[in-house]
Image (tube, helix red, strand yellow):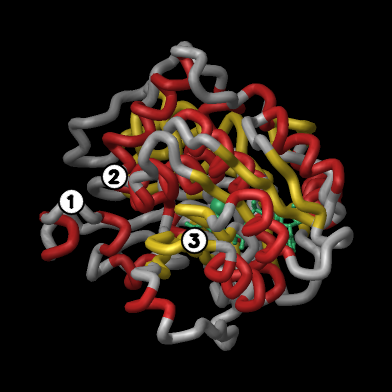
């Protein structure tokens, strides 16, 4: 059935987000409709409103949500009404070479579903009946969303929805970059550049994985304070040093792993430069498509350095989301402390402004 839903929409790049009442159609074959309970505000949502991430407007934002299944489409056996689910913004066909080798974030068919559902169409339309694209096959910054089952992960009902929501992006991305992409060894030295929702999770991932030293690098003293609460052993305020990479090297002798959680060529360069011999720099931040970085080529062979990327923490969502929630339930990952502030959907624009101002670990939109 069709449902009316308040939704956060980007109408034009460079303009503030707006809240509209949209129509969300019921599920087609292989899809389910979710009543959203909470949706985190990620820097990637902001990047989609500036055109840094080039999803064409009009676009329903949101890719980090949890909610309850309210309607199940034909042929769906994995979900029933009442199940709690977390959204996953990677589309995976399950059949291509990457999917079958266990790397669904690299699915060769995923690019077909960057801003639509996997079949190339959408279930969302505005008050004039015009179709609305959806961020990452999700579009979950809305009271309801209809998604393909492969973009939904069933989760434990005992976890509060606000906490579960964050596993859909910030937690999976940050913790997964450490666990899955870097496979950080206990006793390693690490640095995290950019202490937003993603960077904080890279820090707690490093702490949980047994890093010996964890250096947090940011320009915002409040973020560096949060970093300490999440396990950072040292902090570098980039406004207080001439060269952040040199400052990290001075503290650690050169790190084994550096995580770039900003999305800018110069920061990638710093992360790479902060490595010791044999170190690995993992780029998590999403840069503008034209952005470039530079590294000294000789250091790749001579120091056996590695520069690699990480998409949604190299997740296998159906396996990793429950695994991360299990670590939270066991007291090994902090999720409650990530939520600095919640907002009703009417205050969505404020939530974006607060993220830009660096006020929140994560701001979360909560629905009635
Ligand atoms: P955020 O806005 O919450 O945090 C960004 C942080 O970076 C802020 O604390 C800011 O002060 C800091 N910063 C800015 N410039 C800096 C610099 N030069 N040096 C050090 N710190 C600096 O953002 P977020 O939601 O944590 O997202 C971070 C990045 O990760 C974004 O680029 C986002 O698009 C990307 N992201 C990637 C994935 C993925 O799958 N790879 C998933 C989610 C988000
Ligand atoms: Zn995100």
| Residue for point 49% across, 61% down | 276
Compare residues 74 and 43 and report the one nearer the observer: 43
**Which residue position holds label 2?**
316
Q: CA distance from mark 3 to mark 2?
A: 30 Å
**Could one spot residue 197 in this view of the protein?**
yes
Q: Disc 3, ligand 1: is the CB inside 8 Å?
A: no
**Which residue position holds label 1?**
102
Q: Quarter of the picture for ligand 1? A: bottom right
Q: Secondary structure at mark 1?
A: loop
**Position of the C terminus by quadrant:** top right
Q: Callout 2: few (<14), some (14-19), or many (20+) C-alpha neighbours within 10 Å?
A: many
Q: Position of residue 305 (x, y in %)?
A: 39, 68
| Residue for point 67% across, 56% down | 250
In this picture, residue 260 sits left or right of residue 17: left
**Which residue position holds label 3?**
276
| Residue for point 43% across, 52% down | 312
Q: Position of residue 121 (x, y in %)?
A: 38, 66
Q: Is residue 364 above or below residue 219?
A: above
Compare residues 111 and 101 and report the one nearer the observer: 101
Q: Quadrant of residue 72?
A: top left
Q: Secondary structure at mark 2?
A: loop
Q: Is residue 160 above or below residue 111?
A: above
In this picture, residue 56 sits left or right of residue 298: right
- Labelled pair 2, 1 in contact (Cβ < 8 Å): yes
Disc number at residue 183?
Answer: none
Q: Secondary structure at mark 3?
A: strand
Q: Of circles 1 and 3, which is in front? A: 3
Q: Position of residue 178 (x, y in %)?
A: 43, 45
């Amino acid at each position: 059935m069709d449902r009316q839903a308040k939704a956060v929409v980007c109408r034009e790049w460079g303009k503030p987000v707006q809240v509209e009442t949209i129509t969300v159609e019921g599920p087609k074959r292989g899809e389910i409709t979710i009543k959203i309970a909470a949706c985190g505000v990620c820097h990637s949502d902001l990047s989609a409103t500036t055109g840094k991430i080039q999803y064409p407007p009009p676009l329903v934002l949101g890719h980090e949500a949890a909610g309850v299944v309210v309607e199940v489409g034909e042929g769906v056996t994995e979900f029933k009404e009442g199940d709690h689910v977390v959204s996953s913004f990677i589309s995976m066909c399950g059949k291509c070479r990457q999917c079958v080798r266990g790397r669904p974030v690299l699915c060769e068919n995923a690019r077909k579903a960057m801003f639509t559902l996997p079949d190339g169409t959408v279930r969302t339309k505005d008050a004039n009946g015009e179709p609305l694209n959806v961020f990452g096959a999700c579009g979950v910054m809305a009271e309801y969303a209809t998604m393909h089952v492969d973009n939904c992960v069933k989760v434990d009902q005992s976890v509060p929805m606000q906490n579960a929501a964050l596993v859909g992006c910030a937690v999976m991305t940050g913790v997964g970059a450490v666990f899955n992409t870097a496979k950080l060894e206990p006793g390693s030295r690490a640095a995290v550049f950019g202490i937003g929702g993603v960077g904080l999770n890279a820090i707690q991932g490093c702490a949980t994985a047994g890093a010996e030293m964890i250096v947090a690098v940011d320009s915002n003293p409040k973020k560096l304070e949060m970093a300490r609460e999440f396990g950072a052993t040292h902090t570098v305020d980039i406004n207080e040093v001439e060269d952040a990479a040199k400052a990290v090297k001075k503290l650690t002798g050169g790190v084994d792993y550096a995580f770039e959680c900003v999305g800018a060529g110069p920061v990638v360069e710093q992360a790479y430069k902060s490595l010791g011999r044999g170190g690995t720099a993992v780029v998590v931040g999403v840069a503008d498509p034209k952005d470039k970085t530079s590294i000294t080529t000789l250091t790749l062979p001579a120091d056996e350095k590695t520069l690699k990327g990480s998409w949604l923490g190299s997740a296998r969502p159906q396996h990793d989301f429950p695994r991360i929630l299990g670590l939270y339930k066991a007291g090994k990952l902090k999720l409650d402390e990530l939520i600095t502030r919640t907002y009703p959907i009417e205050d969505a624009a404020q939530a974006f402004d607060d993220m830009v101002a660096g006020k929140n670990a994560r701001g979360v939109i909560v629905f009635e």
